[in-house]
Image (tube, grey):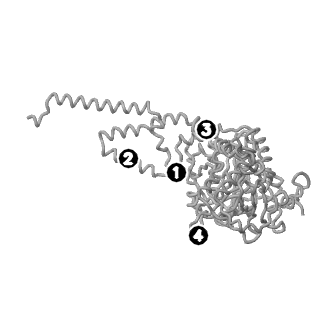
Amino acid sequence: MGALHMHPRIARQTARLRQIVVISVICFAIYCFLLVPEESLDSPRSANPELYQSQPRQQQQQLQREEETHVLPAELLSNRFLTEDQCRASFPGLLDQVDDEVAKGPFKLERPKSNLGPLIARIRGGQLSILSAARKSDLSRDMLAHRSASLHQIANAILTWPRPASAAAPGSSPFSHIPNTIFAFNHHDDPQESTFSYSRPADPALQRTAAGDAKRFFPVPHFSFYSWPLPFIGSLPRAARAISAVESQLRFSAKIPKAVWRGTTWFNNPRAGRLRQNLVRAFGPAAPTKKDWADIESLDWSTLPVQTGPGAGDRNASNALRIEDFCRYKYVVHTEGVTYSGRFQFHTLCASVVLTPPVAWMQHLTHLLRPVFSYTLDPASPDSSSSSSSSSLSSSSASSRLPSLKSVFSFLFFPSSSTESRQQQQQQKQIKPSGLPRHPIDLGPRESPPPLLPYPAPWVRSAWPTEHDPFSANIVFVAPDWSDLEATVAWLETHPRIAEGIARRQRALFEDGGYFSPAAEMCYWRGLIRGWSEVVRVDEGAFDELEGVTWEEFSLKEIHK
């Protein structure tokens, strides 16, 4: 009988133990439901399945707060004499691309076979000298201007190089803190390995040789930091002041609710196909259907040169916009050219949303972009992560914990159903959001719509592995065939708070953060020269026979025949 019937005392203890377990589970569930912070339960998960590696929402919100409060004083931004430690503290991430190249280790600089190659210059004892350069007769007027502007930037960086106290010891050279080196400078649009160039390829496959060796690219600030003698652009400092004047008088909600673009249609990289032509044909004035949301035109260069003013003698397109006037639009369409586009940095100073295919050519600050990809935009998402959706977030935070409570009970009392539930959750995570619709663009009755291109392409996944959500992004990447450009503009128009946030974060980073300031420009050049000198290996004998010309003499010959 003892084997078949439980002793009364044991039965009472078992019942009491069962009550204690049930009460403990209920208390634990109440604790999770009411007391545990939301991020403790939900931060490892995302409400939307992620197609890429993406940042946790907490980290994204922290980055957003940092961007919005990172406003540097004007006196610092105009200080060209910052030490490298001060530079790195003031402009986080400024020298990331330089550091990446230095981390790859040494490389050898070969002497060009002719003067038509990159310019070769030497820094010795704080003096900049030109060892070899293409003749003026071999270069166009624009190329001469670009080359001269960049060399002026380098000379200014050397002249403003701060002298540490250790270099002031008696008998020491006044220029001992400036590294002696020989460097190559490529002033053409196409970047060239082992040179200072205006950009580098974003595609990792283009950063290696056929044998698999790493190519070395050292992006430099654009020549417009010194001057760009076009009547509707000028220098970057001039444009920055003009853009600030526009932004100070114009709220985002009052900007023109259109996507604007101006440019020449024949500047396309072979990998991009007819990117610019198709943009104008599908959405320009002669598009098959009128696009009220678009102000997209090809520049008309048929007009006479400018007759008066600082740009006298230069050609001026009749439908050109001054670079600051792009900021009067809510949306600015960006297209790269043969490689990079020099206008990009100007557009990022606007508090407007930049819409661009994934950037394929990295300038010296492009790595600071935080893109949201158009295919991840949810048509049903709310317009704000804080205000308009705060109530939904608070209620959803509770509802999102219910599965956790169910899982506790299921795990304790129904282990088989708990396993099935976990399998269902895994299947749900694999379901990807449909995103915005893509439609082949209409090029008119005489040409069939081009097929949709893969988006994102494999190289994009490698070049831009981190995806940001709309609440932390500062730029929008759209499909390179423009198949979702119209849908993206429509989505932003129905999500004005998100659109304004993207635009605000962009300007907050590049303007308020001072990354295009004179201080940051000099910081970058000195960091670049220092980094280059650490890893370049030069056969001095190969350059000894070159008779150098001081920069001062060379610069005068550049402007005088």
Q: Mark 2 or mark 3, which is nearer the start of the sequence?
A: 3
Spatial separation of the CA atoms under disc 4 and disc 1: 29 Å
> Vertical placement of 206 versus 171: above or below?
below
Query: Judging from the image, what secondary structure is the residue with disc 3 in?
Result: helix
Q: Residues within 10 Å of mark 4 (few under 14, many from 20)?
A: few
Q: Residue furthest front?
A: 171
Q: Mark 4 or mark 2, which is nearer the start of the sequence?
A: 4
Name the residue beneath numbered marker 1: 53
Query: Judging from the image, what secondary structure is the residue with disc 4 in?
Result: loop
Q: Amino acid at mark 1?
A: Gln
Q: Mark 3 or mark 1, which is nearer the start of the sequence?
A: 1
Spatial separation of the CA atoms under disc 1 and disc 2: 22 Å
Q: Residues within 10 Å of mark 3 (few under 14, many from 20)?
A: few
Query: Judging from the image, what secondary structure is the residue with disc 2 in?
Result: helix
Horizontal placement of 86 versus 555: left or right?
Answer: left
Q: Amino acid at mark 2?
A: Arg
Q: Identify the residue at horizontal 41%, vertical 37% (top origin).
A: 402
Q: Mark 3 or mark 4, which is nearer the start of the sequence?
A: 3
Tell me where residue 123 appears, x and y as whole percent.
Answer: 75, 57
Horizontal placement of 27 versus 550: left or right?
Answer: left
Horizontal placement of 47 versus 146: left or right?
Answer: left
Tell me where residue 155 appears, x and y as whole percent.
Answer: 78, 53
Query: Judging from the image, what secondary structure is the residue with disc 1 in?
Result: strand
Pick the front one: 238 or 96: 96
Label number found at residue 210: 4
Pick the front one: 553 or 399: 553
- Place residue 288 in its image quadrant: bottom right
